[in-house]
Image (spheres, rainbow, N blue to C red):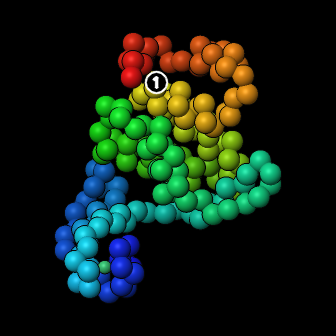
Amino acid sequence: MRCPFCGNIDTQVKDSRPAEDHVSIRRRRFCPACGGRFTTYERVQLRDLVVVKKSGRREAFDRDKLERSIRIAMQKRPIESERLDQMISGIVRRLESMGETDIPSDTIGAIVMEALARIDTVAYVRFASVYKNFQAADDFEDFVSELRPPAAVGREED
Ligand SMILES: [Zn+2]
């Protein structure tokens, strides 16, 4: 695994342990060239997914990219990182088990919103606002009141 700091490809695994309830293996790595330390995760990948954008453009599904967008939505929310990892793994497993290799970006967005709605209303609204790319504030209000999960109401202060 290439060192993300200096580019050296000869890095060492210092520690491996199961994470996310044995869904992944977490490895602590060390770069002897620059002394950098970083973590990698090993996960089962059932199939290679392709995301089909609205424009028709296709690109390989990238778990890290999905994770980044979700983490942005979750910024400063009181949700443990481990729980977030579990949620993301759950989303990926759902996508992988859909029986199709090609997955429309809309489908992924809908699944992410569904998962976020269950754990955090604020993150859900943030993600939805970016994802839906609302033109008018009114549309956004309607959307939120329509889809707001009743169980999570009352936790939306920031
Ligand atoms: Zn390095």
> What residue is at 26 percent from the left and 80 percent from the top?
34
> What residue is at 27 percent from the left and 55 percent from the top?
19
The picture places residue 1, in percent across and down from the top left corner, at 37, 78
> What residue is at 77 percent from the left and 58 percent from the top?
57
Q: Is residue 148 visible?
A: yes
The picture places residue 87, in percent across and down from the top left corner, at 42, 42
SS of the residue under disc 1:
helix
- Quadrant of picture, ligand 1: bottom left
The picture places residue 41, in percent across and down from the top left corner, at 35, 63
Quadrant where the C terminus is found in the figure: top left
139 left or right, relative to 33: right
Decide which of 44, 157 is in the foreground and name it. 157
141 left or right, relative to 119: right
Residue farthest to the left, as pictured: 14
23 left or right, relative to 37: right
Q: Can residue 90 be seen in this view?
A: no
Q: Name the residue under label 1.
A: 121
Decide which of 80, 22 is in the foreground and name it. 80
Can you tell which quarter of the image residue 110 is in? top right
Residue farthest to the right, as pictured: 55
> What residue is at 52 percent from the left and 62 percent from the top?
46
Above or below: residue 138 compared with residue 60: above
Q: Is disc 1's CB within 8 Å of ligand 1? A: no
The picture places residue 76, in percent across and down from the top left corner, at 35, 35
Within 10 angstroms of label 1, few (less than 14), some, or many (20 or more) residues? many
Can you tell which quarter of the image residue 47 is in? bottom right
Decide which of 42, 96 is in the foreground and name it. 42
| Label tally | 1
Query: Residue flagged by tag 1: what amino acid is it?
Result: Thr
Decide which of 122, 147 is in the foreground and name it. 122
Above or below: residue 32 compared with residue 58: below
